[in-house]
Image: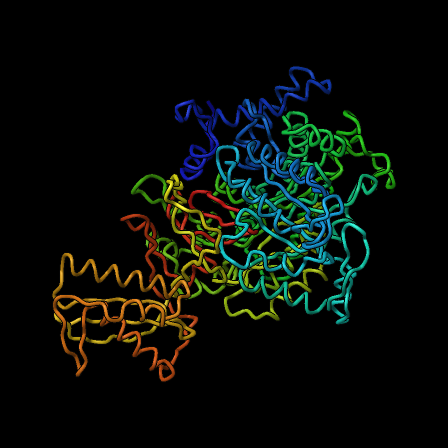
Amino acid sequence: MEELNFSSNARVVLKKRYLQKNNQGNVVETPEEMLKRVAKAIVAPEAKYGATPEAVKRVEQAFFTMMKELEFMPNSPTLMNAGRDLGQLAACFVVPIEDSMESIFDAIKSTALIHKTGGGTGFSFSNLRSQHSLVKSTGGVASGPISFMKVFDSATQAVKQGGTRRGANMGILRVDHPDILAFIKCKETEGEISNFNISVALTNDFMDKVMKGEDYQLVDPASKEGVAKLNASKVFDEIASYAHRNGEPGIVFMDKMDEANPTPNLGKIESTNPCGEQPLLPYESCNLGSINLSKMLKNAGEEFEIDWEKIKRITCLAVRFLDNVIDTNRFPIPQIKENTLRTRKIGLGVMGWATMLGFLGIPYDCDKAVDLAKKVMSFIQSTARDESVILAKARGVFPSWEGSIWEEKEVKIRNATLTTIAPTGTISIIAGPTSSGIEPNFFLCYFRNVLDGEKLLEVDSAFEYVAKKEGFYSHDLMKKIGSGESIQNMEQIPDKIKRIFKTAMEISSLWHIKMQGAFQEYTDNAVSKTINLPHSASLEDVKEAYLLAYKLNCKGITVYRDGSRNVQVLTVDKKKQKETKETKSYSMAIPYPKPRPEVILGTTTKVTTGCGNLYITVNQDEKGNFFEVFTQMGKAGGCAASQLEAVGRLVSLALRGGIDIKVVVEQLKGIRCPSPSWDKGKKIFSCADAIARVLEKRGLDQKDITILKSVASATVAVKVERKDKVVVDVKKNNFNSVVGVCVECGFVLRHQEGCLVCDACGYSKC
């Protein structure tokens, strides 16, 4: 058996999600056997196209070697399912929805079958008539797109995706749909439509009217007639406002996507996959794979340089691999097989871009990096097209070549599209340590939880190399960085190194967008990228990002403002208890507690009770809202202490959930115990009564309390706990965009490309 280059962390992720298991759930496959299984399955079409047994063996070995050397990795469904009974190998699907009950529920069925096999689905709800419009066949009124999105959301929740993760969806609505304002805010309440990313489809006409401040027409999807007008600038502001608030909706420039549609004769592009990088026609699918750019370097004396010959070799091999995937694939429904085979779209992308820049000594946020991005992606795109032309000579053009843009160009090519920049969260762990997609490094060092109680420090390979070369490497320093401290604050690290190794939140959002635009210029499909904004970013900053993305011909954009998510994902969803006859179901919005800021201010009041001195701390958030209550009895222990803690927790939960402090006071005030007391001339009936009186007094004094804003540069230690043990001890000032704790390993989650991502174990939830 050949020795593989997988890290310990990669092996843990493979064991948990990718390696074959028996009926008892025990792993019965090694990582080496997994790669051999994949290579053997994907090489099978070679014989179909006339390759000799010896040639098939050579290609199979080449497929195995490029994965073994971590130079290329296919998308997760291919690694999981190739050579196994399921056999579904594609990651991206678009399912059409027409304006009929039959079409809607056919789409739900198709979605369930796709999610069962490990794929993600995208939908355009733009064809559905608006809420309250007339349904002629029944004489009733339509419920509108959002109500049906909730039905799709519930169906997704019920299907475990490929036995490994919940299914993910993209919901898109055109900006000229009559329900657009309701769609923009449909995820305003945390937990609503939680299995969807949502994006508004903006047209060129709409963007033109935004810049001119003009009104635009809303169009009834059934009659195709105008029904009302809205001011484009105000709708644009509304989109930006909600994205500023919690990262959604994203936007897609649908006309730009459709302008790049290689087969306009087959229809218009209306939707994308869940992360937005793969525009597809109805019932199309696409399989993806990524070249690891951090492995595309060679030594040039004391420095590194790009190995262009290696990129060419791996690109050609990857195109052949992905084209073979189409023939190997077992499609979930017949329509998807038919439509995928007629265009044979593939999506070859990259990962490890930031790591490559680190080895080359080039900062992410500079013109040199942007220019190099264009050069690298241009080379990959042109090489991929050349290889697809070679494949077409041996295997034939894609069946819908006639009438396509390729016929107009007189280019006989095998695949209608070839390049896509996808998020590579999990496969970059497998191929790592290397950076994800074209993102900057989010962490330079971090701890991965390998086994219970064991944490393994992982360092970006470029940063580790440079640290050792420059002589400032030490395990203690890497641990310090892994605990969350920014290298920008470390005197022992040279300024030139600090300049090169900025992390995602230390890079201006404008450079994020410039980098996305650079890769988009030479990408057939689209680019998945998160535009990180600081918490202090204004609404104008979001709008500026949108306009720059449009100007640079990006096909879509997703922004995430640090700390804008209201809810932290802290625990695994528990199985719902069975309802008894006495249990009633209620349909209501569930309020969630706000996350705790790093720094919080408050007052502590001493109250004399019949049980002793009670110290009551009442804290307020940065806006002055009452946020939490802590209580401590002088020498209390046992039952008294536990009851006081319980009361404090419940009061805090109510305040953080938005309950008016007056309501809390009303519930606690006057509760009596056997040992009342007097304090400052007032009778205190119980500890609960004392808490109510302090809250009441603080409420009256609120106007006199000075609210201090947290200093942005303050470093505050935060312990992220899982059950009864500390999993990771971080310093929050360098863990921006943290939105919760991984339910599988306890590491911090971050927001990326519309998903919650764990860098430690590869868990993701889109």
Q: Is residue 522 visible?
A: no
Residue 178: percent from left, percent from top: 71, 58
User: Which residue does the image show at 67% across and 22% down from the upper left?
Assistant: 45
Q: Position of residue 685 (x, y in %)?
A: 18, 71
> Relative to 441, does residue 152 appear above or below in the rendering?
above
In the rendered image, the vertical position of residue 659 relative to residue 569, given as above or below: below
In screen coordinates, is 672 left or right of 87?
left
Residue at x-position 73% and y-position 66%: 230
Query: Which one is in front, 453 or 246?
Result: 246
Q: To which quarter of the image does residue 664 belong?
A: bottom left
Say if 22 sits above or below 245 in the image.
Answer: above
Q: Is residue 689 visible?
A: yes
In the image, taking residue 472 as reference, residue 360 lies left or right, namely right
User: Quick one: 290 or 755, which is closer to the camera?
Assistant: 755
**Residue 216 drawn at (x, y percent):** 77, 64
**Residue appearing at x 63%, y 23% in the figure:** 43
Displayed quadrant of residue 596: bottom left
